Structures are given as C-alpha cells and as structure tokens.
Amino acid sequence: MVGWATRWAARSVNPLVATSRHLQPRGLSSSSFSADEVQDLRGALLGAIEAAETASPSATQLMLETDPSARSPRSTYELHYAELALVDIRAALAKRDALRQRLGVEVADRLLKEERLQVAVAECLMARDRTARIIETLKRQQEANEVTCDT
C-alpha cells in the first residue's frame, strides 16, 4: 500500500519548474515576454521616478560645484536636469506601451499587477506630468527674464 506522502510527492511539482511557471502568467506563451524584459521595465520605471525626484537637488549640487564666476542661474541647471528626467520617464513609459501593444492591454495590465508594477507606472505618470509642468514654468520664467539689447 502506498502512503499519502508518496502519493503527494508523485503529484507535487518540481520547485524549479514551479518557479519558472510562477514568472509566467496564465495564458501567455514563453515567447510572449521574458522575465528579463519585466526586470528591464521595472528598472526603467524606478530609474525614471528617481531621476524626476532628484532633478532639483542635482541642479542645486551642480550649481554649488560650479565655479562662482562661471555659474548660470539655478533655473538653467534645474531645467537641464528636468529635461533629462523627462527623457527617462518617456523611455520607461514607451517600454510599458510596447509591452501593452505586444501582449494586449488586459494581459499586460494583469502582468504589471502580478509583478506589482502598477504603482510604479502610476508614479511615473505623475512624475511625467509634474516634470512637464516644471519645465514649462522654468521656460516661461527664463523667457520673462531675457534681456535684449538694441544696438
């Protein structure tokens, strides 16, 4: 007679197979996406959020490290870092959009939820809007401060 432990062991799944199966949502073939692509998206989203959050402190730091005789106004540095952050944000959101296009919106959104990336996407979208507003404000301020010389 076979015991319950033997029957359970015969039905159990190899832990390595279970791990790779866990990384793959139901209904997707292995060629649809890879875990590396999800990690790349995670890194891009988190990097873009960090770039947006550190634009102002980075601008201040660069201004302080610049020789006082060669300094530009702080808004110049802040505009530069905000534009770089916006490039990173747009690249991260483009990766998310490519994933949604390739897998379909519903499947990609389910994958983002399973990978706990939906909050990072939302933060990235908010950072995009906030950074775009900052850039617009800084450009308006710079235009208002321009001095023209008529000679």
Image (cartoon, rainbow, N blue to C red):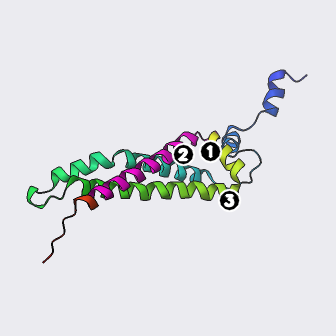
Q: Amino acid at mark 1?
A: Leu
Which residue appears farthest toward the left when viewing the image? 69
Residue of label 3: 102
Q: Which mark is residue 112?
A: 1
Between discs 3 and 2, the one toward the N terminus:
3
Mark 1: give few (<14), some (14-19) or many (20+) Cα within 10 Å. Answer: many
Quarter of the image where one finds residue 113: top right
Marks 2 and 1, Cα distance to the nearest angstrom?
9 Å
Residue 130 percent across, percent down from the top left: 42, 47
For label 2, the residue is: 121
Q: Where's residue 68, x and y in %?
A: 10, 55
Magenta span: 114-142
Left or right: 132 in relation to 116: left
Query: Is 117 one of the magenta-colored residues?
Result: yes
Magenta part mainly helix, strand or loop?
helix
Specify which label sits upstream in the sequence, 2 or 1: 1
Q: Amino acid at mark 2?
A: Val
Asked if disc 1 and disc 3 are in contact, CB closer than 8 Å, the reply is: no
State the separation of the CA atoms marked 3 and 2.
17 Å
Q: Quadrant of the C terminus?
A: bottom left
Pointers 3 and 2 in contact (C-beta within 8 Å): no
**On screen, residue 83 above or below 64:** below
Q: Secondary structure at mark 3?
A: helix
